[in-house]
Image (cartoon, coloured by chain):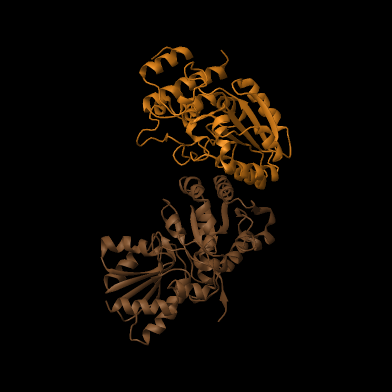
Chain colours: A orange, B brown
Amino acid sequence: MESRERHALNMRRNILKMIHRAQSGHPGGSLSCTDILTALYFGIMNINEDNLNDVQRDKLILSKGHASAALYAALAEKGFISEEELMSYSRIGSRLQGHPNMNELGGVDMSTGSLGMGLSAAVGMCLANKLDGNDFRTYVICGDGELQEGQIWEAAMAAGYYRLDNLLLFVDHNGLQGDGCISEVMNIESIGAKFAAFNWNVLSCDGHDIDVLIEVARYAASCKTMPTVIIAETVKGKGVSFMEDQPDWHGKAPNDEQLAQALAELGGDSDE
Amino acid sequence: MNKKATRDSFGEALAQLALENENVVALSADLTGSARTAQFKEVAPERHFNLGIAEANMISVAAGMAANGKISFASSFAMFASGRAYDQVRNMVGYPHLNVKICASHSGLSAVENGATHQALEDIALMRAVPGMTVIQPCDDRETRQAIRTVSEYEGPVYVRLSREPVEEINDESYHFEIGRGVIIHEGSSPIAMFATGCLVQQSLKALKLLKQQGIDPTLINIHTIKPIDEELIVRYAGESDFIVSLEEHSVMGGLGSAIAEVTASRCPVRQLFIGTQDVYGESGRFDQLLEKYGLSAEKIAERIVEFAGK
């Protein structure tokens, strides 16, 4: 197995263990953006232990902050936090809050949780980078349901207006939200046409093919004078048969049995 | 005497900062003129960002810039900066304790003819409740200039409540602004302490003259920093007073009066007269008419203090 795939697999296992341990969290949306996070941390972003605490560097804003378990799992894969600490997820006194707080944990680049705000903060970071004349890039992951928030489109308008070619947005397009199918709750299609109308470069790819995600992100960086959105086609709950495409697994923790089955399906080390 | 609105003093002070500190950025939401970042834009156009009519976005953009090391001054009307963007202020500025200065003009009744939709009478309450947020309301030109400079040097989120209504100069050349330190404007001989903020410092000064004619001589203290509030000063004067008076161009619910009562209730219980708007919306009108109608003019203040003293 490629090392990136191995990281993604380990992240999925950790996500499930964390949410099981806490009996709280959002497995569906965490598993759907796991490969995007893997591509970012192991192929796209320049982030390492030496620059981790720099005010200026490549940054990631997980605007869909409820997928915090996936972010923490990625930070653990990078070696920024221990796997042991992962198991403190959402527990009292933990740095790993249910929704990420930048003040508690190095590597969390913006506090998120209230949906629809992350893209705006990224606009601020990109404007600051342009002012400072540096070439750091800012990455954002939004949920597709999150695009129902009006502030997303305020930010999209501003990013297009300011021609922020140092901004790359991934839309985790899994088609589901808390209440069910996005197309039935409040349809947001066509996402690409909407961003294009705000002067964005619009790309689309398989959101679970890490190599392709990296390649598309590299291509996006070559696009000047426009921000880029990559509509990443994903499956909510990806990797666990009984969670895949099931809106019920948006915000529910697995029980002991379900965890065992999920880990068995994911394979890897059978240390449970 | 020359009168000047605190929003004007803010605009001039911010433009000066633009020249001195390259890290300072200014953001507006289509109120560049009225919320007074236009002068900043003149001297540092590359560091001025007009986000259009999108206050929620503006506050989060300011947060993102601050996270990258900028000192972000975000301006709008108090109504929209504190109200429309409350979630953004709480979760993206307050929670991560980012270096964003929210400079809110047209606060209180000073949105005058615009009426109730533009008159923020609840913003102190909202902003005060955000953990880690500093809340400042200067009362004149000198205090505003010093406050803007001071908050630019302070690391963390600040809400600065500004007014469009011109006020007289209250503080003299010896004045020194310090976050969290109340200012004694007049040391009186009657056992009454008045704690005022913003525009009502001037109205209170005028009320003192009216009260003097009736033999009442309260102490007047300017509380420019509503949070963190000057507890020791409040306790010192409240402890020696028969009653205290809080004065604000804001609802009596959750504002300066409440902040003072939170101190006195546990440390030195004392009767308190709450002067502010009484759980109502404002309306269109001239500033002097609005002050009169909502009981915030010097005459009304004096009347209410006389009445309260007689109880």
Q: Nearer the viewer, residue A208 or A56?
A: A208
Left or right of residue B167: residue B183: left
Which image quadrant is residue B298 in? bottom left
- Number of marks drawn: 0
Q: Classify A244 as above or below B31.
A: above
Which residue ends up furthest to the front in the rendered image?
Answer: A184
Left or right of residue B139: residue A20: left
Which image quadrant is residue B127 in? bottom left
**The N terminus of chain B: image quadrant:** bottom right
**The C terminus of chain B: image quadrant:** bottom left
Rendered location of residue A235, percent (x, y): 55, 22
Rendered location of residue B82, percent (x, y): 50, 55
Query: Is residue B154 at all visible to an observer of this figure?
Result: no
Q: Residue at x 31, y 76 (%)?
A: B308
Left or right of residue B280: residue B164: right
Rendered location of residue B231, percent (x, y): 34, 63
Which residue ends up furthest to the bottom in the rendered image?
Answer: B213
Rendered location of residue B247, percent (x, y): 40, 70
Q: Classify B247 as above or below A130.
A: below
Query: Is residue B87 at all visible to an observer of this figure?
Result: yes
Q: Classify B9 as above or below A9.
A: below
